[in-house]
Image (spheres, coloured by chain):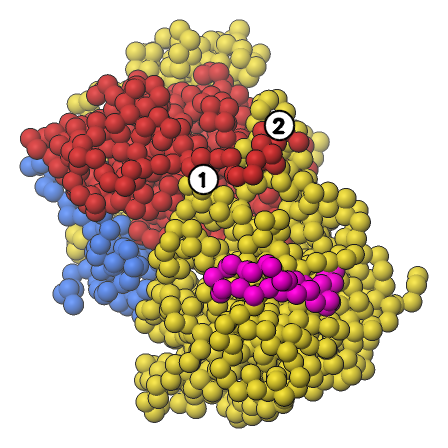
Chain colours: A blue, B red, C yellow
Amino acid sequence: MKILTCPVNGPRPVSEFVYGGEVRPMPDPANTSDFDWADYVFNRSGIPGVKVEWWYHLASGTWFLAERDTVADRVLRTWLPGEEHP
Amino acid sequence: MPYQLLRFALSAKHPEAPMFRAPERLRDSYDAVIIGAGGHGLASAYYLARDHGMTRVAVLERGYIGGGNTGRNTTIIRSNYLTPEGVAFYDESVRLWQDLSQDFDLNLFYSTRGHFTLAHTDSAVRTMRWRAEVNKHLGVDSELVGPEAVKEAAPQIDLSCGGHAPILGALYHAPGAIARHDAVAWGYGRGASQRGVEIHQRTEVTGIDVQRGKVRGVQTSRGYVSTPRVLSAVAGFTPRVCHMVGLRTPLYIHPLQAMVTEPQKPWLDPILVSGSLHVYVSQSARGELVMGASLDPYELHSTRSTLDFTEGLAAHMLDMFPFLSHARVNRQWAGMADMTPDFAPIMGTTGVEGFYLDAGWGTWGFKATPVSGKTMSWTVANGRDHDLIKPFNLSRFSRYELTGEKGAASVGH
Amino acid sequence: MSAPSAAPGRLPPVSGEWIDRSRTIDFRFEGVAYQGFAGDVPSAALWAAGVRTLGRSFKYHRPRGLLSFANHDVNALIQWGARLNLRADVEPLEPGMDLTAVNTFGGVQGDRARVLDLLGAFLPVGFYYKAFHRPRALFPFWERFFRRVTGLGRLDFRAPRLHTPKRYDFADVLVVGAGPSGMAAAVAAGRAGARVVLVDENARIGGSLGWQRGGDTASLERLRALEADLAALPNVSVRPGTLAAGWYADHWIALVDAVRMTKLRARATIVAGGAFEQPAVFRNNDLPGVMLASAAQRLVHRYAVKPMDRAVVLTANADGYRAALDLLAAGVSVGPIVDLRAEGESSGLSERVKQVGIQVLRGHCVLEARGRDGRLCEVTICPWDGQGNASTAAPQKVACDGLVMSTGWAPAAALLYQAGAKMGFDERRQQFVPAALPEGVFAAGRVNGVFTLDNKLADGERAGLEAARLLGFDAPAPRSVAPDLDAASHPWPIVDHPAGRNFVDFDEDLQVKDFLNAAAEGFDNIELLKRFSTVGMGPSQGKHSNMNAIRLLARIRGASPGEVGTTTARPFFHPVPLSHLAGRGFSPRRETPLHSRHAGLGAVWMQAGPWLRPDHYAVPGKRKSENVREEARAVRTGVGLIDVGTLGKIELYGPDAGAFLERVYTGKFANLKVGMTRYAVMLDESGVVIDDGVVARLAEQHFYFTTTTTGAAVVYRELQRWNAQWNLDIGIVNATGPFAAMNLAGPKSRAVLRAITSLDLSNEAFPYLGVRQAEVAGVPARVMRVGFVGELGYEIHVPAHQAGHLWDALMQEGAAHDIRPFGVEAQRLLRLEKGHIIIGQDTDGLTHPDEAGLEWAVKMDKPFFVGQRSVDIVRRRGLRQKLAGFRLDAASAAVAPKECHLVIRDGRIAGRVTSVAFSEVVGAHVGLAFLDPDLSAEGTPFFIRADGGTMVQARVVALPFYDPAGDRQKISG
């Protein structure tokens, strides 16, 4: 089973985590066209590559960010939101 | 002994021609290029040639025929969907399926087994009733049945499922069937090839030439070909192809795994699906139990296997069939499912003129192979969406007109 | 019962043998009694007894004997009671075994299906695609026939579920395969200080050191020395009888033994699993008596069974010469050695066989084998050109009862593939070898293309040291290993024959012509070939067939095997029982702290997500509907008590708590007064209703709110995520588990509660929708005046461990008022009468708030809330459907509709019933339904199609059905 490193709890099997999808910055709802808002709500990049994703450590209730290669399934680094991108 | 086999004994040389042919070189131009030689791409090519007389068509495939999800799914065919548009679409597919072996003169082992979607909770019973009612309304043979009907069709089942998920009822869909998946691709491939379509394997599309919003050609690993029409039928690779024309989609790619036991003597006739236990299972003509579960929990563009998939599925199989303890799992595998937010496909025209999408097949694509070919070929030939697929156009998301299939999401497959 | 047969083939004791001759074991095979020894396997004991037909082949039902004798082919698949598809080659012999061969029709000897062998000409590769579909009506008949003749073992439906516990383990280095290279690797890594686990699927370690001796005992002495080295290392755990069934991400390996699966996490993996000896392909190469050299050597050295009396050796490498010497030492009359290579053997072995008088025919092949009574009796030997062309002018016929083949090997690389290794074809060694290995994965020994013993030991040591160094252990730099001089594999161990029956795949009965024909039909790449011909799809997964298939395809395409490539080896290495994978099973179930109270009151359970909740309480002699109606009546007229502890419960603290709620819920909460509650609706970003609950403000900076039962975990998680982005000054605590909750409802609820609390319950002091913190029955409680069921009511939240005490107190005080516990079913009816929706029942995955009649709860004049922008878009789009209350016309009440029955208008679907029940207080069936918006106006009649297609008429009525002014919730007294 895949190992994922929670920034708080260290390396853990992936079954302890919930995947939260790719990080997608929300556009300003007040200044965004309907089309662009729908794009934000529904569309995903879908393309393989290194992505920054949300992950959640279920046992401790910790959300964090992970940079992961979605082809090789390699996690390059993880960090807590608001922390400096290491 | 059927007469069709006599010729093999009477002929000194193997009396069969190659099923697929392709010239050594790509032509400079085609009337249409289909990306992906899976079931959907080949079916589209077949009907383009057969029904629409378009034979200057190339099917380009980076790997080999039927090597993607066509050869990786668990071959379940049914039309007991939730929405009228879904039912109409899949019902047409089932109708096509039933004639396909004869159309192709190739035995697809299309086997009508009956399909039970088990309900273990009262909310699941409600959903099954919903589906049954929509199905019946549209003339599809579905019925909400009690546990006793499940027991009658599969007498070996433990209706309590080990005591923790008692079966309260089921959606019974008599036309539910399985088929030999690879042969479907071969049948369509052979039929298309016989009608002049070129199937180029090991030919990767690396770019799509779009000028002023119109498709002009495709760049391939074997050179450039010009064409006014490109149909993408590439399942898990769809986002990459869409990226080539600057289209964004709601598709997300998650692996879907499956596993199969060693052959056993026949005992399970129907196809059983349990949303609560995340199990779907049927017994193949070879005697293997072909089993699947739910989608992998995170995005991955790979067909790697996981052990926990087999562990969870095995435990739930034994909940349903405790006597399978000694049965052995022979092999596990995975495909890349291109999922959509509303569990319906993305089909038809796009914002790029001449670029057509056949995607979003998630975990439900195999059963749609014939009707996708039918409707996509019509769409490509006519330049507008076939009536049956209008609800599935990519633009529905920006219009907030999602299909209602999501209501049945808990049952899947 | 007849006495067990004697075992004429058993040799005098052989040094290193695995059997215990002091313990005999009686067993039966196909109804005949036999005897073996402890440590035996059925195949060996049967072979010793002279049995040559151990099974029947899959397609043609040809007799099959021993081929690999290593679980690499399935010619000897047997059944013992409920245990099906056992491998007779490796299954330990047990007393009382009553074995049959699988998939025979009338026994392995007289198998009636053997007629299929005569029909072979009608059954080309993929024949089942070519026929049986016309006439269509006959296909079901043919399908039944196919299903009957395929399949292998038989299930016993009475067999109990095995609850097989699993184990977890950890290692620095896992070494797979305890042959010479694996043992050397384990010793090297172990000496460097690594914690090593060494596994081998065989009952004992040693690999080829044990069985490939070349007629002397030097290798056995090496084995003993290595065993001693391992034994001296306490940090090395040696596990024979343990299969590495699959390699998964981050060195997570499934180790399977006879009784369980162990999931081992390693930091590095060394694959030293050796190679599968590959059969030569010639006519009748499947006759019992034709076997791999390694099989014959294992028979001799492990089980002291004489494989044959007179053996011909077909070889193309040194291993065949060693086998000849081993057989000779076992008393077999050996000769000639048929060497496919024109130049013959270059090592000293050539001289040694000459010294012992074994004839060698270089540049020869075996053209065909001939059998009598289902066993080998003669082989035909011809000169050939090494490329498949035999000179049949002067064939040499040799009578023999054994032919051993050693013409090539294929790497046991399954785990390497699973780990993501790239394999490349080494032309010189004629073998696929690792070309690129992922980090932490190493290969050693035969799998690495290393075959001579010294090299295998050196290669193992290299891998062990490399693994140890990678992990930071202090180990010397490994020495490089000199490559082997000779190829162990012949490039073309295949002789075609016009009469066929030259098998490439022994699982699937595939012959040379099947490959030629499949390729001619267009299946000319390895993946398509596999799928069309089914090569490698049998239970042995191509271990003995894929390499020859690749060679055949390469020749057809005029390519090298490297260009053809291999198929991917997916798990499992050998099939794994479902019981091992399943383990004990894990089906989590949650019970509220009041579970035992409910059980004592006769609760009938229903599942709500992971929870068990009382559906209703059974009263003996009454039907469910009566019970539900009485429970509801108690709430309407007296007092009832329901456990609502499964609701999600969340504490929210901090200066920004109000602002946070305004962002995640559609309503306004910043202005909620301390001591008051408010209904709350949550949307997702697409504007779909996903949850609801009640928000209570306990203090200026302290809110406490509920979520739906099934939404609890997700809502809590998503709220955390939002704040991970917004960074508001709040704290969120999931109190679902710590708090219990129960709802005391009914006109007499105040009277019951008053008796056990000092809280002022008057309407003035504690109004409707108020919340108070007070002691109830001596327990610190949060009491909310809510109206879900439409009566005066108090939802009381207390610490979970005190819930039982409170429940008992309420029931005791309530007794005077005929209090009744009520279940989910009565609650659903009561809330329906009030027109309150249930998220997930009266909404689905696409329901927008306006459709569900929740417009009033959506405050668009806030700066932001999740889903707001989407609601704005959807509102401009217009309403597609509307949830409305309906009342069934009295004339229709005979056939009441059910939830999810459809609303039909002009033959079209115009809606769906989401909730329906007979309401005693209304005196009619009432319900909620999604309707086309133009049907949703009050008073509009519409039709519902009920069971049996009966159309029943209903009419839209205003909500709620009961107590529209809401007076009941506010009564005083």
Residue at image mark 2: B3
Q: In the figure, residue C662 lies in which quadrant?
A: top left
Q: Position of residue C575 (x, y in %)?
A: 57, 58
Q: Residue at x 24, y 40 (%)?
A: B25
Q: In the figure, residue B28 lies in which quadrant?
A: top left
**Quick check: C627 above or below C412?**
above
Q: Name the amino acid type tagged 1.
A: Glu
Instruction: State the SS at label 1.
Output: loop
Image-based side of B181 in relation to C5, left or right: left
Q: Which residues are magenta?
A: C375-401
Q: In the figure, residue C258 lies in which quadrant?
A: bottom right
Instruction: State the SS at label 2.
Output: helix
Q: Position of residue C733 (x, y in %)?
A: 31, 56
Q: Is residue C264 visible?
A: no
Q: Name the amino acid type tagged 2.
A: Tyr
Image-based side of C475 in relation to C216, left or right: left
Q: Which mark is residue C521?
A: 1
| Letter of the chain that mark 1 sits on in the rendering | C
Nearest to the observer: residue B171 or residue A70: A70
**Quick check: B140 above or below C223?**
above
